Amino acid sequence: MLDDLESILFSREQIADRVQEVGRTISRDYASTQPLVIGVLKGAFVFLADLVRRIDIPVEIDFMAISSYGASTKSSGVVKIIKDLDVPVEGRHVLVVEDIVDTGMTLSYLRDVLLRRGAASVKIVTAFDKPARRVVAIAPDYCCFEVPNAFLVGYGLDYSERYRHLPCVGVLRPDIYSGE
Ligand code: IMP
């Protein structure tokens, strides 16, 4: 599977070190609260699992799944919730966990929904940030790595549901997805 990568951007070890640092910062920043950690399915499941085990304050964990209405409408920012939370967010300090922030549309939508539902605060932590692709002005509050404008796979990121389980993250070889 690693043969399908053009290059490896971050190794398993580099990711682990950085996730530990970010977990420490979050533990400090949220020391007096019990945040509700919300993972955005599917891509965030790997990062969330690693991150929460580096957070040493009490947290609650829930998941949401969001879908865009296909590639053409994604640029219009039309997204919908396909799996909602099991717990109310009213009055809660919410930490949204994302795999990667790209155009920013998913997170901008999600943040608005959570604030409208009465969350006391909404912050974003992402494993990867691709600022060159941003369409909506949104910046993650915590980010492990800034990445270049390339299609990445691994560490939760997929191409057609493949590669999510790779422990490293890398650039997918263009010949794998060209012709589609
Ligand atoms: P946004 O709404 O454009 O920020 O979309 C973010 C979502 O697009 C992420 O949660 C990923 O599911 C997907 N995505 C963006 N860039 C990549 C990439 O390089 N590889 C795999 N998925 C990506």
Image (tube, helix red, strand yellow):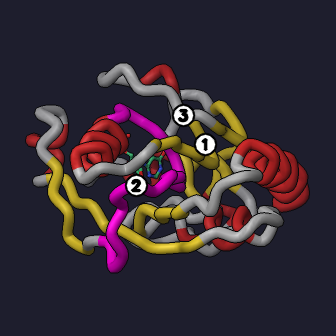
Q: Residues within 10 Å of mark 3 (few under 14, many from 20)?
A: some
| Residue at 51% over, 42% down | 123
| Residue at 65% over, 38% down | 142
Q: Quadrant of the N terminus?
A: bottom right
- Tell me the amino acid under the disc marked 3: Pro
Mark 2–mark 3 CB contact (< 8 Å): no
Look at the image and say whether residue 89 sits in the magenta stretch.
yes
Direction bottom: furthest residue? 86
The alpha-carbon separation of the residues under discs 2 and 3 comes to: 21 Å
Indicate if the residue with disc 1 has its beta carbon within 8 Å of ligand 1. Answer: yes
Indicate if the residue with disc 2 has its beta carbon within 8 Å of ligand 1. Answer: no
Q: Which residue is mark 2?
A: 91
Secondary structure category for the residue under label 2? loop
Q: Is residue 103 above or below residue 85?
A: above
N-terminal-most mark, 3 or 1: 1
5 lies left or right of 85: right
Q: Which residue is mark 1?
A: 128
- Tell me the amino acid under the disc marked 1: Phe
Secondary structure category for the residue under label 1? strand
Secondary structure category for the residue under label 3? loop
Dot in front, 3 or 1? 3
Q: Is residue 108 above or below residue 180?
A: above
The magenta region covers 85-104
- Residue 129 placed where, x, y %? 56, 35
- Which quadrant would residue 91 be assigned to in this image? bottom left
